[in-house]
Each structure stands twice: as C-alpha cells, then as structure tokens.
Amino acid sequence: MNYALITGASSGIGYELALLFAKNGHNLILVARQKNKLQQLADELKNNHQVETLVIPLDLSRTDAASEIFEQLQAKSIHVDYLVNNAGFYVKGTFSETSWKEEQKLIQLQCLNYTQLTKLFLPAMLNQRAGGILNIGSTGSFVPGPYNAVYCAAKSFVLSFSEAVAEEVSGSGVNITALCPGGTNTNFHKFNERKSSIFFPMMKASKVAKSGYKALMQGKRVVVPGVSNKIQVFLLRFIPGKLVSKLAGFIVTK
C-alpha cells in the first residue's frame, strides 16, 4: 500500500499537502502535536477519499521523535513511499535576547529531525527505486535573516541538505525536493506576527502545497512558489551580501 508521511499535518501547508496526497490516492500517516486536529483530518480524508490513515500525535522538537515514528511504522510493517518534512515554527527577535530553549527546539526540529527522518526512510525508497521526499524550506533559505537568525539558518540548512542528497540519488527513481515559500497565509504566520506581506503578497497555503506536490512528482529539486517570490530570489543574486542582510532585517522589523 502506498503511504505518505506528513509532519506538521494539522494545519497550513501540511494540511493542504495531506489533502493533495489523499486526492491522488495515497494513504496517509499524519504527525503533529494536536491529536484532536489530526483525528479530524484523518476522518475527513477517510470519508472523502477512501484512503487509510494513521495518526501519530507527537512533538517533533523532541530528540527521539524521528526514531519513535520510524519504530512505530516498522512495528506495523508500513513502508513510507513519500516523506514530507513540513513541521516547523519561528523564533523572532534579536539573537542575544531570544530564548535558547526555543531555538534549540527549532534546530532539533528543522535540522536534526528533518535529517534523521530522511536518513531512516530514504534507504527503503532507494531499494524500491521509487518515492520521494519533500522538505519545506523558505525564501529565508536564500538569505541571512537578522531578527530571525536561527530560523533562516535552519531553512538554509534544509535547502543545502535537500539539494545535496538529491544529487546523490539522481537516477535512482527517488525524488528529493525543497519547497521554499515566502509569506503564506497560515496560522504559522499569524502566531508569529510576521510582516513580510508589507513588501510581498501572501500566498494561500493551498497554492503553495500544489506547487510543492507538483514539483516533487516531476522530480524538481527546488521550487519557489509565486511570481513575486521567484523574482525576489532571482534578484538576490545581484545584490551585495551586506545589503541583503540589511534589507532582510528591515523587512522583519517593519
């Protein structure tokens, strides 16, 4: 049976990706902290798309989260055909004043657990010569981010890691894609009061998810959804690094 594992599936881009995978006939393994939301989504997908669902309520910033997911699925003899590393959160503020505890969780989640989940599930995909991994980066993957320094650094890691492993598995039948959205209209944005929409229009989570799903299935390594985001990333090539940092910091604080 074909299964897609989606982290951070209870809302936003993860929720929309779960809908897309279900519509296209994939069974779902849904991971996030909020059990009630996950179960509601699981029931919705079962009823509307006749797919099998498995709910794993789990805090993905825990050091043992990746291994716990893997062990649960091994015990059930479930093979993961597609892995979506989507779960994430945001720490905003001057680095000297922000919470190390929160930043440590962010690094654990968006660097270490993304990497470990890929490490655990990629070998079986390669043995099957089929499948794919979608890692959620950001337009922040392309810039240093004053006042969200650790977040942008983590997203830069996601992009670099994804592109490197994509090259390693080239021709294997397994696709690895980094999805790098800009401002997206989700609870993630609202909770953290990000204000980049002053300069760049917010995208709907459904459109971002469609771009990511399509790119993964087509075997693209990096996708930046939205015309304005594409222009933004393209222009960064021609702007001196120091000015990029100043502009990025200005956008976050205004």
Image: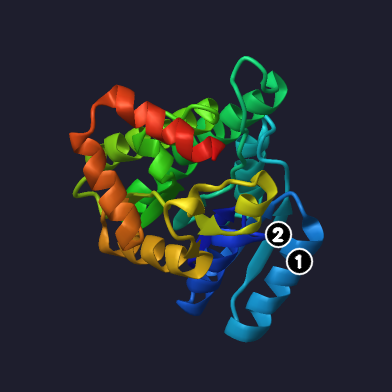
User: Residue 108, how many percent across, how many down?
Assistant: 60, 29
Res 175 visible: no
Q: Secondary structure at mark 2?
A: strand
Identity of the residue drawn at 31% across and 22% down:
242
The residue tagged 1 is 39
Label 1 to label 2, Cα distance in Å?
A: 7 Å
Identify the amino acid type marked 2: Val
Q: Nearer the viewer, residue 6 or 106?
A: 106
Q: Nearer the viewer, residue 28 or 191?
A: 191
Question: Horizontal placement of 7 versus 166: left or right?
Answer: right
Identity of the residue drawn at 42% across and 47% down:
124
The residue tagged 2 is 55
Q: Nearer the viewer, residue 136 or 239?
A: 239
Vertical placement of residue 36 versus 249, above or below: below
Earlier along the polypeptide chain: callout 1 or callout 2? 1
Residue 68 quadrant: top right
Q: Residues within 10 Å of mark 1 (few under 14, many from 20)?
A: some
Q: Which mark is on residue 174?
A: none
Q: Nearer the viewer, residue 6 or 247?
A: 247
- Tally the numbered discs: 2
Identity of the residue drawn at 24% across and 27% down:
240
Residue 102 quadrant: top right
Q: Residues within 10 Å of mark 2 (few under 14, many from 20)?
A: some
Identity of the residue drawn at 35% across and 40% down:
162
